[in-house]
Amino acid sequence: MIIMRIVSVRTGAEVSRAEIADDGTITYSGGESAQAAVRNRMRERGIDEAAAVSELARDGWSNGYLKVPLPPHI
């Protein structure tokens, strides 16, 4: 499973998320922010939805108000 969380830059509270299940199904929860970030990444990079979710979860993203935190490094 891949989880991409969108959180508030100011508070760190989660506002929305996208999840890719092991079977490839993508689900969104919370507000529209996760869907908007994925749509923008798809358009910018010319990639499909699953690739956009995976890329955002791996690389992070921010617009100054919201962000996808980088995964922890072990």
Image: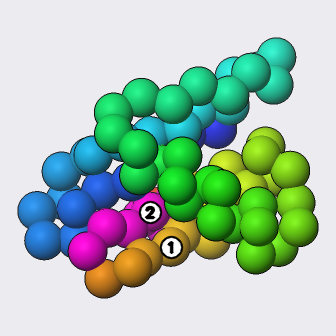
Does the magenta run of residues contain 67?
A: yes
Q: Mark 1 or mark 2, which is nearer the start of the sequence?
A: 1
The answer to which image quadrant residue 38 occupies is bottom right
Residue 43, percent from left and from top: 77, 67
Give the extent of the magenta segment: 65-71
Side (left or right) of 28 relative to 32: right
Q: Is residue 68 visible?
A: yes
Disc 2 from disc 1: Cα separation: 5 Å
Decide: few, some or many residues near mark 1? Use Cα within 10 Å; few <14, some 14-19, many ≥20: some
Vertical placement of residue 46 versus 6, above or below = below
**Mark 2 — residue?**
68
The answer to which image quadrant residue 30 occupies is top left
Q: Is residue 1 visible?
A: no
Side (left or right) of 52 relative to 46: left
Pointers 2 and 1 in contact (CB under 8 A)?
A: yes
Q: Residue at x 18, y 51 (%)?
A: 13
Does the magenta run of residues contain 39?
A: no
**Mark 1 — residue?**
61
The C terminus lies in quadrant: bottom right
Element assignment for label 1: strand
Q: Residue at x 51, y 31 (%)?
A: 28
Residue 1, percent from left and from top: 66, 29
